[in-house]
Amino acid sequence: MPKAEKNHLFEDERAGAIYRTAARMIYERGFDATSMSGIAEALGMTKPGLYYYVKGKKELLYSIMSFAMGQLDEYVIGPAQEIADPKERLQIIVRQHARLLTQQNEAGVLAILMDEVGGLSPEQKQSIVERKRVYFDFVRTTLDELAATDSLQPVDSTVGAFSILGMVMWISRWYQPDGRLSSEEVVSSITRIALGGLLRQGDGITAPVGSDLLQT
Amino acid sequence: MPKAEKNHLFEDERAGAIYRTAARMIYERGFDATSMSGIAEALGMTKPGLYYYVKGKKELLYSIMSFAMGQLDEYVIGPAQEIADPKERLQIIVRQHARLLTQQNEAGVLAILMDEVGGLSPEQKQSIVERKRVYFDFVRTTLDELAATDSLQPVDSTVGAFSILGMVMWISRWYQPDGRLSSEEVVSSITRIALGGLLRQGDGITAPVGSDLLQT
């Protein structure tokens, strides 16, 4: 691997660790009680080292949210966009999003922080709201495609899209990685409930393939 | 109507108006920026008049949450507890909770504030967490009863209960009473998705009866 690329990878991992740690601290203490020094200390970094990645506390919330949306792009939207069949695409969306929230460290805390758009500048807020909107529209369009081939239950596609996102996003509020349920048990049940609720009866649900977030 | 009862009714309505207004203000400005004087002013009450209903700002958040849980008891849990058949009970739970969130003024804001248990005293927090737990267990037990008669999809009942609550609670984050969708359109779609996702195929879903929150 060329040196430049290797350094880039390392920086990405470091940035991810920073955003996850900062998100956990903000979630537990609140944004006001979380300081740049505290984050640096928790990560064993110097304060200038931290400022290399995050310009300042004002940028922190937006950086964290952009990171979380980037994960959604990488693990959910990107893989699903490659699927032409809307039934299969819906399954990939639900499965990959549920895996993201149950397999990635601090993904639940990152998801919960996504509600804190009130702490952003108007431009930052617009950017995050727009990215959320793109995801919502992607899900709803998938349901509209199902309706066009008479494969959707007789439900409104807006209500359907919000119902799917609601049940999946809710995972971040209750799932405990060290609890009784494995990631795959949650993913399997949620996928069955979502597809069973949205697809017309008799429209077969493909058996899940693989069990790893990166395995689509 | 005897005078005492009439006064009691009036006080209940007044209390409801106070909790709804306070919830809206806290949601929009944050808890710290909401003052007892501001709430009294918004309601056209004197400050002593407000203190007759709410002992002080420290009690405010707990009073609001208790009011919201009381509504859940009255409109969802109470009516559902009277239904012996678990299939019908599940339908009543989803339908009544979705109606509560789409028909009652500020029900969405009240639901969102239910997450703010961090602002409660330990005793208050325990009481609210316990009441939420009772509701969750009620939903999960209903799914376990369905599983016992082989009417539940092959899903984990804990994941199933959280999925139902997630999709229903999410309504509070997106539904706009003055938007395109009527309360009954949302209720009808959500009920179909929830029952279609949880019940085994071929287990008929009864047509919804009535369209009013109080009509079960």
Image: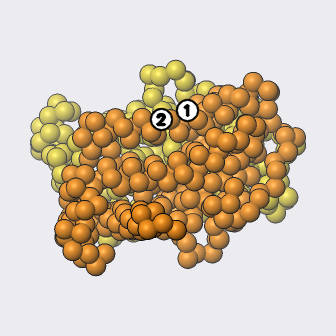
Chain colours: A yellow, B orange
Task: Please tell me the numbered disc located at residue B104.
Answer: none
Label 2 belongs to which residue?
B133
Asked which quadrant contains residue A149, the reply is bottom right
Would residue A154 be visible to someone looking at this image?
yes
Image position of A103 (left or right of A61)? right
The picture places residue B111, in percent across and down from the top left corner, at 45, 54
Q: Are marks 1 and 2 in contact (CB under 8 Å)?
A: yes
For the residue marked with disc 2, what is the amino acid? Answer: Arg
**Image position of A96 with respect to B18: above or below:** above
**Image position of B24 with respect to A161: above or below:** below
* Chain letter for mark 2: B
Tell me the distance, in whole angstroms, between the alpha carbons under discs 1 and 2: 6 Å
**Image position of B16 with respect to A185: above or below:** below
Please tell me whether mark 2 sits on a helix, a strand or a loop. Answer: helix
Question: What residue is shown at x 74% (from left), y 31% (from top)?
Answer: B146
Q: Which sits in the foreground, A13 or A205?
A: A205
Q: Which sits in the foreground, A153 or B171?
A: B171
Q: How many numbered tags mark residues here? A: 2
Image position of B107 (left or right of B154)? left
Asked which quadrant contains residue B159, the reply is top right
Please tell me whether mark 1 sits on a helix, a strand or a loop. Answer: helix
For the residue marked with disc 1, what is the amino acid? Answer: Asp
Q: Which sits in the foreground, A155 or B191?
A: B191
Label 1 belongs to which residue?
B137
Question: What residue is shown at x 38% (from left), y 44% (from top)?
Answer: A110
The picture places residue B172, in percent across and down from the top left corner, at 50, 59
Question: What residue is shown at x 18% (from left), y 45% (from top)?
Answer: A34
| Same-chain status of marks 1 and 2 | yes
* Chain letter for mark 1: B
